[in-house]
Amino acid sequence: MSRLKVAVLISGRGSNLRALLDACAETGFPAEIVLVVSNKPDAGGLAHAEAAGLPAVVVDHRDFPDKPSFEAAMETELHRTGAELVCLAGFMRLLTPGFVERWRDRLINIHPSLLPAFKGLDTHARAIAAGVRISGCTVHYVRSEMDTGPIILQVVVPVLNGDDADALAARVLAAEHRCYPAALRLIAEGRVQVDGERVIIDGPPASGVMSSPPT
Ligand code: GRF
């Protein structure tokens, strides 16, 4: 069976990239990573790609006069490698509506909150300040408006007494590393359908991705 060809776009440390690489290395996993693109030459995540023997390409946004030409350079790489799905994993550039439309329903992102709550940056500090008892992460299809789009999978974690933003971030990050591979698996198995603003998952929900609240 042929595996879904995936490109991962990063800007930083790449721990989610690493989680996706580890998943794709498992026997029978239905996706393979064919390309890693970083817009930053010093992104720590590039080392994960190298360690996995994967082609990693730096497309530095500062080398281009505008966003469309930067994105065109990335798309040249995407087409060259035959990428069928693009995963944003800590990719810190907003994409143009043109790019988002061209990759509609083939472009996903992970965000460190339970969307639609806490879009944008500093999610953990804001979640703590708001006093929420649960937080988590969301994998969603990308739409032009930041941190919107049909939600594929979410993993919940508790917010505990005494948490600061770093403690909550670490708990959410561990959840991200389960959530992103699980979402990728569902897509690659052909079990995910977009229906308007919602996602319909065919068959039983992904197992092993939901965290329990504290007892
Ligand atoms: C993650 O928290 C992800 O949800 C957000 O950016 C962070 C990237 O972390 N979009 P890493 O580079 O994958 O370690």
Image: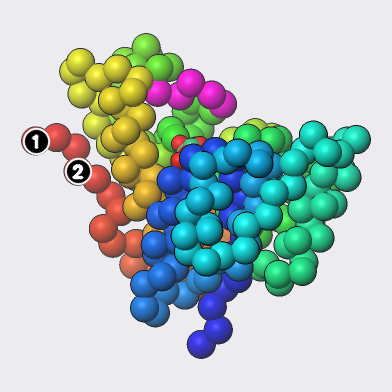
Residue 211 appears in the figure: yes
Quadrant of the frame with the C terminus: top left
Task: Find out whether residue 4 is within the magenta segment.
Answer: no
The residue at the point 26 percent across, 58 percent down is 208
The residue at the point 55 percent across, 50 percent down is 46
Q: Which residue ends up furthest to the left in the rendered image? A: 215
Question: Which residue, given by chain and number where applicable, does mark 2 sit on?
Answer: 212
Label 2: element kind: loop
Residue 69: image location, x then y, percent: 88, 45
Horizontal arrangement in the rendering, residue 161 relative to residue 129 (left or right)? left
**The magenta segment:** 120-124
Task: Find out whether residue 121 is within the magenta segment.
Answer: yes
Amino acid at circle 1: Thr
Relative to 118, is 78 above or below?
A: below
Question: Which residue, given by chain and number where applicable, does mark 1 sit on?
Answer: 215
Residue 105: image location, x then y, percent: 65, 58
Amino acid at circle 2: Ser
Near-viewer residue (107 or 80): 80
Horizontal arrangement in the rendering, residue 66 relative to residue 178 (left or right)? right
- The dot on residue 46 is none
Q: Which residue ends up furthest to the bottom in the rendered image? A: 1
The residue at the point 84 percent across, 52 percent down is 72
Local packing at callout 2 (Cα closer than 10 Å; few below 14, some 14-19, many 20+) is: few
**Is the residue under label 2 in contact with that under label 1 (CB below 8 Å)?**
yes
Residue 102: image location, x then y, percent: 79, 56
